[in-house]
Image (spheres, rainbow, N blue to C red):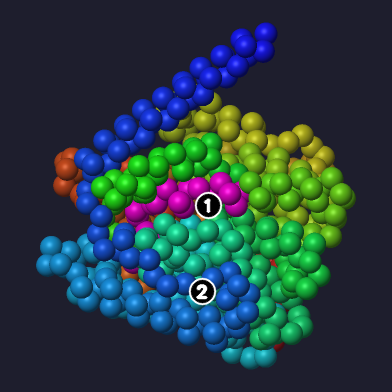
Amino acid sequence: MVGFVSRWLRRAIVVVGALLLIIVALRAWDVQSGPPLGPWHEFVPPELTVAELDRADWAGWMAAEDAAFAATRAAVTDRLDAADRVAINRWFAGSPVNPARLARDWNRSFVLEPSGPPAGVAVFLHGLTDAPFSLRHLAQAYRAQGFVAIGMRMPGHGMTPGGLTEAVWEDWMAATRLAMRAARARVPSGPLHLVGYSNGGALVLKHALDALEDQRLPQADRLVLLSPMVGVTAFARFAGLAGLPAFLPRFAKAAWLDILPEFNPYKFNSFPVNAARQTHRLTAALQAQLDRLAQGGRLAALPPVLTFQSVVDATVSTPAVLTRLYERLPDNGSEVVLFDLNRSVKFGPLFAAGADAALQRILTPMPRRYAVTVVGNDGDSLAAAARRVPAGGTAEGVTPLGLEWPRGVYSLSHVALPFPAADGLYGGEPDPADQMGVALGAIAVRGERGVLVMDANHFARITWNPFFAYLMDRVREGLSPPP
């Protein structure tokens, strides 16, 4: 019997090893046919270590950030080959999408000060491959309400996608701790809010949980999440396998899941394997901590959480937001706002099988310890309404929003929530005063194949929120009036 088991184990090891070799070989062959790496893929800007971040103050962080941007200019922008000095390359000094040419470089960390004495302070954490730009509208709204708004650039972001080949989620948590220390240093008393988008949402939650276990960490009074990364797709768990051939210099491109043109001044289009791996590591650590603290009855001390989430999201798991987070929250005034599909009659027959039941699949039975608001159609028209069930209740209240679904838009998306229609980069009706070098949200992708620098599907995903005004109204409900 022992000999049989031993033979079976040896065969299983051989089979698994053979499969891994086949995967590595196929991956190595596949990447060789793709576009070449640019210097922005290969250069890794210098960043502070976790230990250095935990010792730094805001002035030290900004000095280090200035040095890293200067190093990026010297290593990439100033050394571009002639072939890379083109309008669609954000690192070309003459490109209209070079961030240095725009009114403000929102790739950098920022502090927005109110006009009078601070009523509070808020920290804003952006998403993966993103930049502080993505939360500027919310930060400006907080400032208008008398808050100091601190936008933190996460290590590995803002300069070159090569930075994400080495950044780890522990770096991002240390940067979050630094931003929270800086917030309390600037405003020692008063409300402290923590706002996170996508990967930043996971960092917000992780810091709030860490603060439950470490009294030295500043705890937020309110958490605001947009498309939070509570759970990710199963692919992220095994993404590291795709990068195995990169251990050989000849196959360095295997360290990248996507190598794409970089025409967006405030987001990387190229995506390294390591970035996917870090999302899995972060969400695994977050969920393990949620499990541990829930079992110990310690989640009762969490601050209220307000979450905005699209019912359909191709990047993060919408069900995980409800089952892994909200079902564990105490009755503390938390709420989730779900943006439904556009269920007008004209789209009904065009939805994929099961898509029209997405909302019913993710909602948990009533009563709940948290409020749920669903933003969707008011009847069969394009008009929108908010349907809200309060915590502990079963009756639904309906509020018309005075807003409509834009024609041709069948849902929101993971990337759309923090951007209004007037956003100069992502908005469908960009404000001419908000010039970003390119208006990605207003591009109408109709024409012949092979003309655009990216596949048309890249531009078909909605990048702005037609219900942004409602989102902002809900955020402002939790803010003190300006002094």
Residue 19 picture location, percent across and down: 42, 25
Q: Which residue in the structure is indicated by mark 1? A: 278
- Going by the numbered disc 2, the residue's amino acid type is Leu
Horizontally, residue 250 falls left or right of residue 429, namely: left
Q: State left or right for residue 361 relative to residue 425.
A: right
Q: CA distance from mark 2 to mark 1?
A: 18 Å
Residue 168 in view here:
yes
Closer to the camera in the image, 377 or 358: 358
Towards the viewer: 23 or 269: 23
Up-down: is 39 above or below 257? Answer: below
Label at residue 174: none
Does residue 15 show up magenta in the picture? Answer: no
What percent of the width, then of the height, locates residue 167? 48, 61
User: Which numbered disc covers residue 48?
Assistant: 2
Point out residue 247 in the picture as x, y percentages from the top left corner.
37, 47
Q: In the figure, 169 relative to 29: above or below?
A: below
Residue type highlighted by circle 1: Gln
In primary-sequence order, the first of circles 2 and 1 is 2
Range of magenta residues = 265-283
Residue at (74%, 71%) from the top-left corner?
A: 217
- Image position, residue 318 (x, y; %): 60, 42
Quadrant of the image containing the C terminus: bottom right
> From the image, which quarter does the N terminus lie in?
top right
Q: Residue at x 70, y 43 (%)?
A: 324
Whether residue 147 appears in this view of the structure is no
Question: Local crowd at mark 2 within 10 Å, few (<14), some, or many (≥20)?
Answer: some
